[in-house]
Image (cartoon, rainbow, N blue to C red):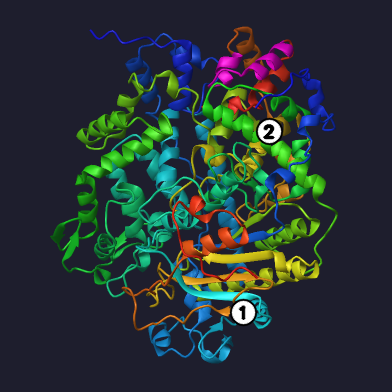
Amino acid sequence: MNMQPLLSLDDARHLLFRAGFGPKPGQIRTYAGLGREAAFQGLLEDTRKFKKVQVSIRDFPEPGELKELSKEERAELRKKAGFLRQDLNVRWLEEMSHSKGQLREKMALFWHDHFATRIFRADFVQQQLHLIRTHALGSFREMLFAISKDAAMLQFLNNQQNRKAHPNENFAREVLELFTLGRGHYTETDIKEAARAFTGWGFKFNGDFVFRKWQHDKGIKTFLGKTGDFNGDDILNILLDHPRTAYYLTEKICKYLIHENPDKAFVENAAKVFRDADYQVSALLRYIFTSNHFYQDANRGTRIKSPVEFIVSLNRILGLNHKPPEGQIFIQNLLGQILFRPPSVAGWTEGRGWIDSTTLLARLKIPKILILQRVPDLELAENPDIKLVEELQGLGKIGKIMKAKVDWRSLKKLNEEKMLIVSALAVNPSTNLAQLLQTNASDLEAKTLLLVSSPEFQMS
Amino acid sequence: MHYNRRTFLKLSALASASAMVPGFLKGSGLGDSLDFKGKRLIVIQLSGGNDGLNTLIPFRNDDYYSLRPKLGIAAEEVLKLDDALGFNPVMAGMRELWDQGDLTIINRVGYPNPDRSHFRSMDIWHSGSNSNEYWETGWLGRYLDAQCEGCVKPHGIIETNETLSLAVKGSNGSGLAVRDLQKLYNATRDSHLQSLAAEISAENADLGFLYSTLTQTIESVGYIHDQASKYKAQSEFPRNTFGKSLKMIAEMIVSGIETPVYYASLGGFDTHVYQRIKHDNLLKNLSNGLKALTDELKASDNWNNTRIMVFSEFGRRVEQNASAGTDHGKANVFFLLGGNLKKPGMYNSIPNLSDLDDGDLKFEIDFRRIYAEILNNWMEVDAEKILKRRFDPLGIVRG
């Protein structure tokens, strides 16, 4: 029998910050004492049931009706779509914050960035979100096919306009550059040929995939050294056969889960595992989360949380109940990451890229604003993506929108068990912070605020 | 960096924002250490791949009209600059600058083995690398590094964006992102932040990075705020994010802040589909913004000491696509503005649309030569050290 090491408190903390968004009060104790395999299995089991994230989308006009709309009616429609996307945003945040299936949501966030899409129609956004959450831990092969036929993706990358007579290369380019091979592993000709193969791939008004035969270029293409009358499916199969794909994806996942500069040898081994499992994501994750490499000291507390990770980890440790939930959208805007609004198809930046003077100040101040209801001295950057529903517009001050209730009872219990600091922070407090915590040890509110308003809290 | 040990503040002080500012945190004398030479550079980035051919139109060229049946702009609408090229009709502001000799136009700027990917090509423009190299610092970030070994001055570059571009990130530090100066200043006067900033050690390098970013921010923002006078720009800037960012730059310059480099960007130029209206609106915004900015700099006698460069990561294909748009191309037009330019006017010849590189404009001028020109002859620093190789300057900058 394989005597795997049992997780220490520190190990459990590290696992919960990486395979999810950080521990909820009491969660570290649940995992400490388990073997690595059992801990991972537990995380996986918790993802089995998951709720679809959806909003009520009614009265979307039919194609014929859309043409009849006046300019004002179209503007109304855009506004409505904006509200719906925001609804989806806060509902997904809620799942990330409070659902048991942390591993699913953490990986779904990864895929959301990997397949970054930015479009107007909320029903397409909802459809794509469900797609990536469903496939997040499953077969990447299946996910790649599904996302390549997803209406949101096809629209965003203009493949609806990719026709035999006038190919549009956008979609083909990103499939190669961003989704599978990465830069430097194909030529411009490969892109042109792939674009030809994808001609005719489009979507119907209701979001279903459709193959428009008459727009498809049936001719012979040469792609990555292979020749044939390829269609889109063939291109995807060739890409999945390419040895580079597993490495590219694995490296990206290791950057997300282990360290910004992952160990090359480890990535190579993990990529082999991924490939041998025919791109089953959970197999790769099992390999990562049971490895010695993952648990090395040098890989602990070294990742800077993305804005969404910051919000969700804050929600989890404080048991936050945001009323109105839209406050979380303002925070996303301040910190530079709004769900469903990536800056481009390449997704968001990573690590230190999240941090500059403005965003660091915001991270250090937001907990106070949320909890103490201070009027913020932060600037709210103007962003056409943020639409206030009528009720909120009347409230005026941003302080009234960023409001949340803390679960002080759980925190009191956690503090009495002497688990507050280790649950809140993924890294040990520096000298200064440790002294501040000591000075304020008898004041739970002060101590808690110090913890979540620190540079240390930004690490995972 | 070492600080004197201080008494740690109890959290009750958190409620008040008017705590005492320790002496070492006051912004004093930081301007001097930059060795400010009185010259300024403003970089304006057009993100997405600006369609140069519909910006500066070859209105006598038949190929232009035959390859762009929908997108081609009629000759009679073009704002003619000479007998071959003219501006898009919305660019009246820039036309005026041309007439006044404040503009040098460089055609067909690019680089060898160009990349058609936004991110890759923008990284190349930001870093100054060759197209097969992957550098993690920007040309302006390295300029900042070269100023002073081991000391970091974020306000050496002010970027009017929410996040910093690669262009302004160096090995030792990066530029300062400023959207609203007063709010930023208020945000740094928090006693809680100042007590945190007294930290002298951290568990790992990334945590250390957070702490040092905090300290530098407090110092730099203090300096800029103290220097900035109550000057409010008089000219009419576009009422949008871009207009606001140019307005802030104008106000900072006129206030005498000793920041040599400003970086602003305008996005939305990736016009694959239904280009005409979108593109025209962007150009109008650019033109009006630049006009207001130059008016401010002229009125305050800062025009001769300023150079503005306007670039995009690539141009677009000559032929329009099936969606009344254009796809990614290669070489593009480049603008340099300023007072007392050495070579105002058209620097080189118009694009030859019958001699294309696989449907794209062929490049003639490597953009690194423009960077070398600006670094050597305007910023007076060692361009070869910053760009990591030697490029022949163009001779267009020194006035």
Q: Is residue A232 magenta?
A: no
**Cα distance in 3D space between marks 1 and 2:** 45 Å
**Which residue shows up at 45% across the image and 39% down it?**
A109
A398 horizontally vs B263: left or right: right
Mark sitting earlier along the chain (1/2): 1
Given this view, does label 1 or label 2 mark the residue nearer the observer?
2
Q: What is the span of residues highlighted in magenta in the rendered image?
A: A420-441
Q: Residues within 10 Å of mark 1 (few under 14, many from 20)?
A: many
Locate residue B348, reporting x and y percent: 49, 79
The amino acid type, in three-letter code, at marker 1 is Val
The amino acid type, in three-letter code, at marker 2 is Thr
Which residue bears the numbered disc 2?
B215
The answer as to whether the residues below labels 1 and 2 share one chain is yes
Host chain of mark 2: B
Element class at badge 2: helix
Which residue bears the numbered disc 1?
B90
Q: Main secondary structure of the magenta part?
A: helix
Q: Nearer the viewer, residue B193 or A416?
A: B193
- Quadrant, the N terminus of chain A: top left
Residue B312 visible to an observer of this rendering: yes
Element class at badge 1: loop
